[in-house]
Image (spheres, grey):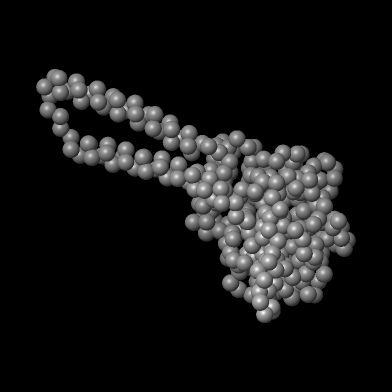
Amino acid sequence: MTELSIVVPCFNEEACLAELHLRLGAAARVAVRENYELVLVNDGSRDGSWTMMQRLATEDAHVVAVNLSRNHGHQLALTAGLDLCRGDKILVIDADLQDPPELLSAMMHAMREQEADVVYGVRKSRAGETAFKRATAHGFYRLLSRATEVDIPLDAGDFRLMSRRALDALLAMPEQARFIRGMVAWIGFKQVPFAYDRAERFAGETKYPFRKMMRFAFDALTGFSSAPLKLASHAGLWLSLGSLLLILYIAYAWFAGQSIQGWTSLMLVVVVLGAIQMFVLALMGEYIGRLYNEAKRRPLYIVQEVAGGERTEARLGYLAEATANKDKPIGKGKRPTR
């Protein structure tokens, strides 16, 4: 078995790939000499990322380049790399080089010394990020910690080193909407923090604008907590009590012969109640939508092509056979084994 796998999801990271390959290769050789693989997952990039990955796989036998059939999103691209890697230890890192690859040896040392299954990076500082992003990230992690039943580490991203048994436990979880840092926390085993200073992005632009950040945060909250549904039920209870008091007040005023005025206030109550009802229905719809997606049991990802390395089985995804050069495409592939 390969001693170390380094899994890197990539989306439009052409400007980072050469430096990423150089630094990750150097860090891996320091840690495990030549017994490693670098799994680069192309998540439907629109630039020259896949072409560069193919070239790297041709020039370096350690590189395994995986091309997904379309853009699946960061968490599913990461899932594909984790599913297909073969290492006894697995490092998860993003392609933007904000998480320094040179920390690999220290993380492996911490794993051995503390006999841990997971060493996760905790950000002491976040260079190159706006005050708004730092503030929202700070608030998100603390809200998530209070709302979920799982003890998810604060200020920790996907940058982590895992043992094979921890990864196997993670891959036994087939849900579609994935929040991997929370799922790793859920599996348990001994997990230890590793504090570091996060650097600026090496090149390019962030792939998480505000809209995607909000979607990611909502996926995390609804995937690990029923708190939104409880909030909806509590709101419904208090509104019911308020409605009862309002009915008693109206009945008292009618019996007392007082004229009941307040068209504006009446409309305000109707609008507020309607808005809260729609909010509650939206929350219920989000959870029902998750059940619908899970019930379809589709593969989490589809691999169009693999360059370098040996083909392997996919537990959670579908590996399409190369049929472009055949007279009669056969359409075969390897389906999930679950």
- Which is nearer the eye, 210 or 322? 322
The x, y position of residue 79, in whole percent, is 67, 55
The x, y position of residue 188, in whole percent, is 72, 39
Point 58% across, 41% down: residue: 224
Q: Quadrant of the N terminus?
A: bottom right
Residue 254 sits above or below residue 89 on the image: above
Quarter of the image where one finds residue 208 = bottom right
- Which is nearer the eye, 82 or 305? 305
Quarter of the image where one finds residue 69 = bottom right
Residue 249 sits above or below residue 170 on the image: above
Point 74% across, 70% down: residue: 307
Point 74% across, 41% down: residue: 191
The x, y position of residue 16, in whole percent, is 67, 68
Q: Horizontally, is 96 left or right of 216 in the view?
A: right
Point 48% across, 34% down: residue: 230
The total number of labels drawn is 0
Q: Horizontally, is 211 left or right of 205 in the view?
A: left
The x, y position of residue 226, in whole percent, is 53, 37
